[in-house]
Image (cartoon, rainbow, N blue to C red):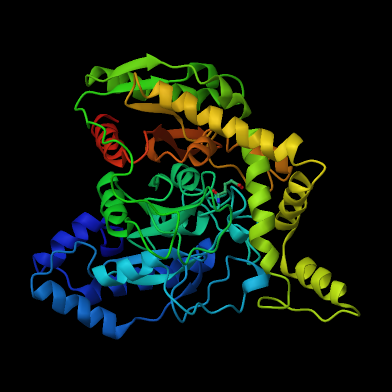
């Protein structure tokens, strides 16, 4: 039998209801594992003390026959999601003393479901990065090989779940920050349809791209968490009603579109081989593999790295050392701004603010930002067309498994690793990463993931194909 902290949500919920386990025992197991393993992994920036009131309340609800399967489940929360009364630093010096004054909508929903919070997890500063090396509070290590990154930016949430320091977690995804760390740590990660989950209480990065979503040990757990946090919200004007988009049929046998033209150079041979092998198994299980052409994908990365920094530069403008956040006193007001932002922001954040300010400046907005925005529309149209003949589109989540610390110190090489995940954020479509096996590096088996995109609000299709993958792999 697995240790309590190794359980999935489903398993823990079942044992709690069968009286084989108490909420207290489950919490204690997770907290103890978190405290024991965090010094090595640095998955959490803070581990919370047991919330006795919440633990007792959760137990009472279960004893009374509560139906919420998240009741009493210890979760890890990314440090850019506000929990009232707790620090929320987005792993930045700028916000290192910022205490949240309200709950993010997802937190309100999880509290209503009776979930417990183990702590706030490490991340790349403001969620910019793919390795968690850009945290102001030191990198997080991958539980599968501590000489390697867990991915990012939700690397802390991924390491917390993969290392069994929590049962499941929430992350945020602007260009892959849930799916990529999920792939590199052997988890399921879902980026919901844009607007499906409220962004109220998420520290904004790229407002037209950001979504909160689950990192979990199984598709069923990701499904449970997603169902608990989704829904339109008066506090987020961009959140959408449940059936804004036409409903899509969830077929037993799916047509899986594969853009083979994207699987060429830049993707590790053994990652491609694992992907092809899994497709074969899916085909043996009855699904159909269809070639699709998505020519504009070649420009997706460029479009993302214009639009995303543009939104970053506007969202982070408020952190000026005057209103809140890290404040420095200079000789003039301008010095106040410059000193506060130079000290408060790390290198990657400053790089993106500069880039974003440039592409939005009056001389360059047409050449860069507006072109990128046009490319975004074309991409979305291409995907919409592809979905007329396929149910999902598949590729590997990442071109390679987890890399070593410092290996991608050149920012461009880091950005290139986002090639497969960013498009779902640009199109607003939901996407999921599911473990597809391992590849070997330096004698270690490292997890890699398969990535599926579905039409807007067709998350159920992703969960269905995810369940198929779990069955055949
Ligand atoms: N790695 C991507 C970036 O650095 C995605 C980040 C994210 O999804 N938050 O922009």
Please state the horizontal and vertical placement of residue 455, each as a whole percent of the image: 37, 33
Q: Residue at x 29, y 47 (%)?
A: 218
Q: Quadrant of residue 94?
A: bottom right
Residue 341 in view = yes
Give the farthest residue toward the top.
291
Please state the horizontal and vertical placement of residue 211, each as a whole percent of the image: 46, 52
Quarter of the figure with the N terminus: bottom left
Please state the horizontal and vertical placement of residue 459, each as a whole percent of the image: 31, 41
Q: Residue at x 29, y 85 (%)?
A: 52
Left or right, 124 with respect to 184, comes to right
Q: Which of the two residues, 26 or 331, is positioned nearer the viewer here?
A: 331
Left or right, 359 with respect to 128, comes to right
Q: Quadrant of residue 61?
A: bottom left
Q: Quadrant of residue 234?
A: bottom left
Residue 399 in view = no
Quarter of the figure with the C terminus: top left
Above-or-below relation of 26 to 289: below
Left or right, 404 with respect to 16, comes to right
Give the farthest residue toward the bottom.
53
Give the farthest residue toward the right.
331
Above-or-below relation of 258 to 29: above
Q: Which of the two residues, 214 or 181, is positioned nearer the viewer here?
A: 214
In the rendered picture of this protein, how many numbered marks are placed on residues? 0
Q: Residue at x 76, y 34 (%)?
A: 367
Q: Residue at x 40, y 54 (%)?
A: 239
Please state the horizontal and vertical placement of residue 452, each as a whole percent of the image: 39, 33
């Amino acid at each position: 039998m697995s240790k309590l902290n190794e359980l999935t949500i489903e398993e823990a919920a079942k044992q709690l209801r069968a009286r084989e386990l108490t909420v207290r025992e489950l919490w204690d197991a997770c907290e103890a594992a978190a405290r024991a393993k965090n010094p090595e992994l640095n998955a959490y920036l803070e581990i919370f003390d047991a919330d006795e009131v919440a633990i007792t309340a959760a137990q009472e609800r279960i004893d009374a026959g509560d139906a919420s399967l998240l009741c009493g489940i210890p979760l890890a929360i990314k440090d850019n999601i506000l929990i009232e009364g707790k620090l929320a630093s987005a792993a930045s010096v700028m916000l290192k003393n910022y205490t949240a004054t309200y709950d993010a909508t997802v937190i309100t929903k999880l509290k209503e479901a009776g979930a417990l919070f183990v702590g706030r997890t490490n991340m790349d500063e403001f969620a910019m990065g793919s390795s968690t090396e850009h945290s102001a509070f030191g990198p997080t290590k991958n539980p599968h090989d501590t000489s390697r990154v867990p991915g990012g930016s939700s690397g802390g949430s991924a390491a917390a779940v993969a290392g069994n320091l929590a049962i499941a977690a929430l992350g945020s995804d602007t260009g892959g920050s849930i799916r990529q760390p999920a792939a590199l740590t052997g988890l399921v990660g879902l980026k919901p349809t844009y607007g499906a989950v409220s962004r109220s209480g998420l520290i904004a990065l790229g407002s037209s791209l950001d979504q909160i979503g689950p990192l979990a040990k199984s598709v069923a757990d990701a499904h449970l968490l997603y169902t608990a946090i989704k829904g339109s919200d008066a506090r987020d004007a961009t959140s959408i009603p449940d059936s804004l988009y036409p409903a899509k049929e969830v077929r037993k046998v799916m047509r899986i579109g594969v853009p083979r033209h994207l699987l060429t150079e830049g993707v590790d041979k053994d990652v491609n081989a694992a992907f092809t092998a899994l497709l074969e198994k899916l085909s043996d299980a009855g699904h159909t593999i269809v070639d699709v052409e998505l020519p504009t994908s070649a420009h997706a990365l460029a479009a993302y790295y214009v639009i995303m920094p543009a939104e970053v530069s506007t969202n982070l403008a408020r952190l000026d050392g005057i209103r809140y956040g890290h404040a420095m006193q200079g000789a003039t007001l301008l010095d106040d701004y410059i000193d506060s932002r130079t000290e408060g922001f790390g290198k990657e954040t400053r790089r993106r603010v500069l880039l974003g300010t440039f592409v939005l400046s009056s001389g360059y907005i047409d050449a860069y930002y507006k072109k990128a925005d046009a490319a975004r529309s074309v991409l979305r149209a291409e995907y919409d067309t592809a979905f007329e003949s396929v149910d999902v589109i598949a590729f590997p989540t990442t071109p390679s498994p987890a890399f070593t610390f410092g290996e991608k110190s050149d920012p461009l090489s880091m950005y290139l690793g986002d090639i497969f995940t960013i498009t779902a954020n640009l199109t607003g479509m939901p996407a999921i990463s599911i473990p597809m096996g391992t590849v070997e590096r330096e004698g270690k088996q490292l997890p890699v993931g398969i990535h599926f995109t579905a039409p807007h609000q067709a998350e159920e299709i992703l969960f269905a194909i995810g369940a198929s993958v779990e069955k055949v792999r």
